[in-house]
Amino acid sequence: MTTSNPRRLEGKTALVTGSTRGLGRTIAEWLAREGADVIVSGREADAVGASVQALRALGSTAVGFPADLANLEDTNKLAAATLEYAPRLDILVNNAGMSIRSSFWDVTPQEFEYQLNVNWRSPFVLNQKIAKNMIDNGIQGRIVNISTIGARACHTDALVYDAAKGAVEVMTRNM
């Protein structure tokens, strides 16, 4: 937190995917401390609710929308619910991610699809919808896409995860 303007995000609203634990929860808490209202998203409704309560305790007008980002319908519903709640969304943080560790020859088609959907398709869909909304409404917002060092220096037995996060990096540069 800065000493000159400790609530520099006052009046801003942010969506943070995967914000019920780990890095996403930490990002959501930082945004709340800086004055932003935060939209929490995660797969489990109870965890979303707990994160919302914790952010409200920090002074954020937090809300939560459970979504399994492996599911395209859930991803689209999250985008729609977010823009309905915050038509002038200022910040999108695509943080949700997951990896199923396995040698590449043992990855099942279902594991491949699940990892690709969470780690690359959902950020693509959310970026597309949120960026278009920002442009159409003249919002000078920010989109942050979280990747992994594995996109450049591979993790053992994480080919699909690393490749999907590499695709996120390419998408980010292209955007």
Image (cartoon, rainbow, N blue to C red):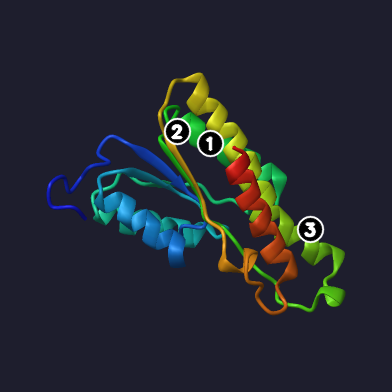
Q: CA distance from mark 1 to mark 3?
A: 25 Å
Residue drawn at 45 percent across, 27 percent down: 87
Mark 1–mark 2 CB contact (< 8 Å): yes
**Numbered badge on residue 166:** none
Query: Which residue is nearer to you in this view: 145 or 65?
Result: 145
Circle 3: residue type: Glu
Q: What secondary structure is found at the residue carrying circle 3?
A: helix
Residue drawn at 73 percent across, 57 percent down: 116
Q: What secondary structure is found at the residue carrying circle 2?
A: helix
Residue 26, given in percent of the width and then of the height, sits at 38, 62
> How dense is the environment of label 1, judged by Cα within 10 Å: few (below 14), some, or many (20 and up)?
some
Viewer-side label of 3, 2: 3
Residue 21, given in percent of the width and then of the height, sits at 45, 65
Query: Which residue is nearer to you in this view: 104 or 27?
Result: 104
**Numbered badge on residue 81:** 1
Mark 1–mark 3 CB contact (< 8 Å): no
Viewer-side label of 1, 3: 3
Count numbered badges in the picture: 3
Q: CA distance from mark 3 to mark 2?
A: 30 Å
Residue drawn at 43 percent across, 56 percent down: 49
Left or right position of 1 against 174: left
Residue at the far left in the pictured view: 4
Residue 155, given in percent of the width and then of the height, sits at 65, 75
Circle 2: residue type: Tyr
**Numbered badge on residue 113:** 3
Residue 39, given in percent of the width and then of the height, sits at 43, 45
**Numbered badge on residue 85:** 2
